[in-house]
Each structure stands twice: as C-alpha cells, then as structure tokens.
Image (cartoon, helix red, strand yellow):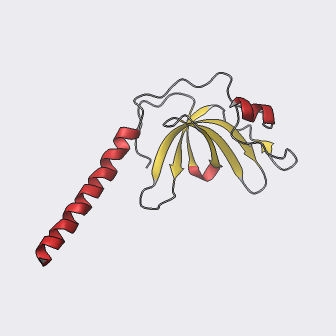
Amino acid sequence: MQYLFSWLIIIAVIIFVLWLVLSKHREAPHTWPELPQESFVYGRPATDEDFHAGRAAFVTDENIFTPKTDILIPQYAYFLDRTFYYLNKKTPVIVIQVEESQDVTAVGFINLLTGKIDSTSMNSIHLLGTTPPPKFEPYI
C-alpha cells in the first residue's frame, strides 16, 4: 500500500509539471497585432475621458505624476507576473501609458491574451520596442 501511495504522488507531480509547461504554450497568441494609432496617451497626463475611452489604464494627480516622454508609446512589451516566484509568468502586452512620480513609474497596458486594460509598475514590464517581435519567447 505504501508503494501505491508513493507512485500516485509521483504521477500527480508529473501531471502537474506537464500542465504547467503545456499551458504556457496554449496561452500565447500566434502573432503580435499592429500597434494602435490613437488609443494611447503620450506626452500629457491621462484624463477621465481617456480612461473611459480606453486610451488609459489610470488617471493620476497631475501635481504628483508627470508623463514619461523618454519611453515610446505605444510599444510592445511583456508583463512579468511575479505573483508566485516559481511561475514567473510573462504576458504579451501593448504599453499605452507611462507616468512617473518621485517614487514610482506607473505603466498602463493592454493585455493581448484577454484584451483587458490594466496597470503595473515599470519593474514588472519588459519593453520590446515598436517593431513587432518575430515570436513570443520566454523571458530570460
């Protein structure tokens, strides 16, 4: 009975590892879309109108946050989800907004897997530029 239980645990671990490996490949889109021509905010603080129109992920106090103009917007990037250290999941996104304060640089993006607009700190973004990358590759 003890050997049976050990084998069941080993099989469960193998199935879990295979699920983790294979599920990442099913999530990724096949190609990067074109960058938006109008649905982003660059060179000025985002407004409530930008937020409601889907051009911005957040609205900040313009006395505290200023637009960060040394980063081209829009551009391709990966969102590095480090919620769980061992997963270190990366998601393809398009950056549509970047604003900074003395303490933090906030980034708004479109998640290409879900189509939803979200935001994070610059520490969780790996910028790829304005040319579509050839394919989705693991973050190194």
Q: Residue at x 23, y 59 (%)?
A: 14
Question: Given the current orientation, which residue lies at the most extreme front position?
Answer: 1
Q: In terms of image quadrants, where is residue 79?
A: top right
Q: Is residue 93 visible?
A: yes
Vertical comparison of 64 with 135: above or below: below
Location of residue 97 in the rendering, given as x and y in whole percent from the top left corner = 69, 37
The single residue placed furthest to the bottom in the displayed view is 2
Q: Is 11 on the left-hand or right-hand side of 21?
A: left
- The structure residue drawn at horizontal position 84% and vertical position 50%, both measured from the top left corner, is 64
Q: Residue 58, position in %: x, y?
A: 72, 42
Image position of 70 with respect to 124: above or below: above
Q: Taking 66 as reference, is 52 above or below it? A: above
User: Is residue 42 visible to us here?
Assistant: no
Quadrant location of the N terminus in the rendered image: bottom left
Image location (x, y in percent) of residue 27: 40, 39
- Seen in the image, is 17 located left or right of residue 110? left
Name, please, the residue furthest toward the right: 63
84 vs 42: above or below: below
Please name the residue shown 66% across and 33% down the image.
72
Residue 80 at x, y percent in the picture:
52, 50
Left-right relation of 68 to 93 = right
Task: Answer left or right for 115 relative to 119.
Answer: left
- Label total for image: 0
Residue 108 or 13: which is nearer the viewer? 13
Residue at 75% from the left image edge and 32% from the top image edge: 50
